[in-house]
Image (spheres, helix red, strand yellow):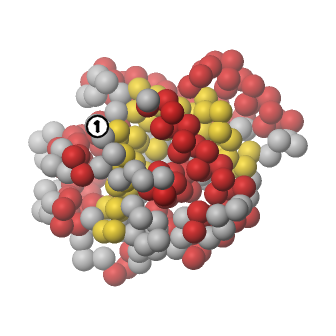
Amino acid sequence: MVRILAIANQKGGVGKTTTSINLAASLASIGKRVLLVDLDPQGNTTMGSGVDKRLLDHTVYQILLGEQTIAKVRLSTKPGKYDLLPANQELAGAEVEMVSLEQRESRLKEALQAIQADYDFILIDCPPALNLLTLNGLCAAHAVIIPMQCEYYALEGLSDLVNTIKRVRMGFNPSIRIEGLLRTMFDPRNLLAQQVSDQLKQHFGNKVYQTIIPRNIRLAEAPGFGLPVLYHDRQSRGARAYLELANEILATAS
């Protein structure tokens, strides 16, 4: 049965897009059928997957408005080996246009139902904001992965996101839960990072992934080549960390 995971954090710069691309590639590399949905108008997940957002005829924008089906919009990425629903700047107008539509918060969920049998995992890269696009991602998902840096302001933002997930559970998606908190761009030499990491484990227990994503230059370089880090430098610490995360996620599902 497909697992639909939203990757969300309203704070920018926490490694959300990096996690979306590299988790998708890692799951695909171990034989899982993966669809990655880019819900961010910036289109960074699209570009980082090797797809030029400026040349797209159709994107997730048309899917949300009911003008196209997922089967006609999805692209196969190489060498990532996962499918992609791409996005570009036109998605920014979707919020305004969706306001008058019925069930505007569940447009993505309805669209995904037609192709769920094609995949083992559907990953949804949500924009760094608590808006209607993010709400569509949360309503469609079974669970949420929260990438976060271990710094002071991250804890405050985490509290806001947890409250949002609770409201979504009460109003739109009763089954949604937190899949896990992922510590990203982690530097073990940083005392504050260690302290925040310890606080996360105290408050969230086994909801904090054992896998930690380190600061790694190869992770930062890979999007410039339109590649997941796995195909930029498979031996890098970043590539190994995301493969470890993929296996940890699979282990918790079994």
Residue matched to label 1: 1
Going 69% across and 18% down the picture, which residue do you hit? 202
Q: Position of residue 82 (x, y in %)?
A: 39, 61
Q: Is residue 200 above or below residue 243?
A: above
Q: Position of residue 168 (x, y in %)?
A: 33, 28
Q: Is residue 211 left or right of residue 61?
A: right
The answer to whether residue 232 is visible is yes
The C terminus, quarter of image: top left
| Residue toward you, 56 or 254 | 254
Q: Residue furthest bottom?
A: 55
Q: Is residue 21 above or below residue 143?
A: below
Going 46% across and 62% down the picture, which residue do you hit? 45
Going 33% across and 45% down the picture, which residue do you hit? 120
Q: Position of residue 139 (x, y in %)?
A: 29, 36
The local crowd at label 1, few if under 14, some if 14 to 19, many if 20 or more residues have their Cα within 10 Å, is few
Residue 216 image-quadrant placement: bottom right
The N terminus, quarter of image: top left
| Residue toward you, 225 or 120 | 120
The answer to whether residue 90 is visible is no
Label 1 is placed on what type of residue?
Met
| Residue toward you, 158 or 205 | 205
| Residue toward you, 178 or 43 | 178
Going 26% across and 57% down the picture, which residue do you hit? 94
Q: Is residue 24 left or right of residue 233?
A: left
Q: Position of residue 196 (x, y in %)?
A: 74, 30
Residue 209 image-quadrant placement: top right
Number of numbered tags placed on the structure image: 1
Query: Element at badge 1?
Result: loop
